[in-house]
Amino acid sequence: MMRIEQLLERNRAWAAAMVKEDPGFFSRLSQLQKPEFLWIGCSDSRVPANQITGTLPGEVFVHRNVANVVVHTDLNLLTVVEYAVEVLGIEHVIVCGHYGCGGVRAAMTQRDFGLINHWLRNIKDVYRTHRGELESIDDAERRADRLTELNVLEQVHNLAKTTCIQTAWKKHRRPHLHGWVYGIDNGLLKPIVDLAPDASIDPLYEIRPEA
C-alpha cells in the first residue's frame, strides 16, 4: 500500500519535472484560470479528467460525484456550473460516465447501501424510465453498460433543464453540452449525446421571461 508520504514525494518530483520542462508554467498558472471545459464526472479514481483527455492543469474545470449525476437540488453541482458558465465563460460542459461504474451497478440492485440509497435513486429513475429497453438485454454486463450510457444521456438533459444553462443559452449562446462514456478497459471516450445552445427541450421545462 502506498504511504501518504509517497504522495508528497511524487508531488515534489512532478513539480520539479514541470519546471524543468517549462520554467514559467506555475507562474502563468497562478495568474489566471481560463478553462474552456467543465467536466462533470464520476468520483471513480480510475477516471481522472486531465489524464484521459491529455489536458494540463488550468484547462479543465472539474466537478465529480458518484455516477456523474446532475441533481437539481445539489447546490454543490449547481454552484460549480454557475461559476463555470457565468464567471469562467466555459464553452463546453462534458458529463462523462464510465463503463464498470459501481454506482450504476449498485442502482440496478435492491441492496441497502445506507445513505447512498438516496443518491442512487436518481439512477434507479433512469432505469425505470428505460425499463423496457434495459430488460430486453439478457446479458447483465451489457445491460449495465447500456444503463451507463442512458444515465449520461439523462444527466445531460437534466443539465439543459437548469436555470443557469437556459439563461446562458439565451444570453451568451453557450455552452455546448456533451455526454461521453469512458472505457476503463481501453482508455477511449465514446460520445453519446451533444446539445447545442439552440437545442430544444421539452417545453414543460423551458424557462421563459414574463411578457
Image (spheres, grey):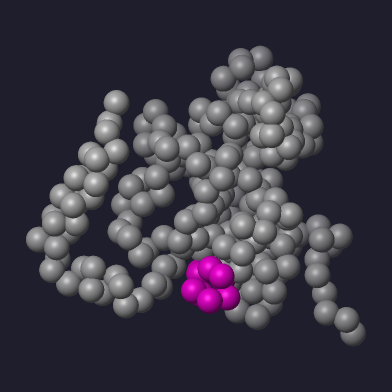
Seen from the viewer's position, the closer of residues 199 and 34 is 34
Percent of width and height locating residue 70: 65, 50
Q: Report the number of numbered marks.
A: 0
Left or right: residue 173 compared with residue 182 = right
Q: In the rendered image of this protein, does residue 63 appear above or below residue 196?
A: above
Asked if residue 71 can be seen in this view, the reply is yes
Percent of width and height locating residue 29: 29, 70
Percent of width and height locating residue 31: 32, 77
In the rendered image, the quadrant that contains the N terminus is: top left
Percent of width and height locating residue 148: 60, 34
Furthest residue in direction left, as rendered: 20
Furthest residue in direction top, as rendered: 138
Left or right: residue 83 compared with residue 169 = left
Q: Which portion, as a residue range, is magenta?
A: 83-91
In the rendered image, the quadrant that contains the C terminus is: bottom right
In the image, what residue occupies the spot 56% across and 70% down? 83
Left or right: residue 21 compared with residue 72 = left
Whether residue 27 is in magenta: the answer is: no
Q: Residue 120 appears in which quarter of the rendering?
A: top right
Asked if residue 130 can be seen in this view, the reply is no
In the image, what residue occupies the spot 70% across and 51% down? 71
Furthest residue in direction right, as rendered: 211
Q: In the rendered image of this protein, does residue 35 appear above or below residue 98?
A: below
Whether residue 84 is in magenta: the answer is: yes
In the image, what residue occupies the spot 81% across and 57% down? 202
In the image, what residue occupies the spot 41% across and 49% down? 49
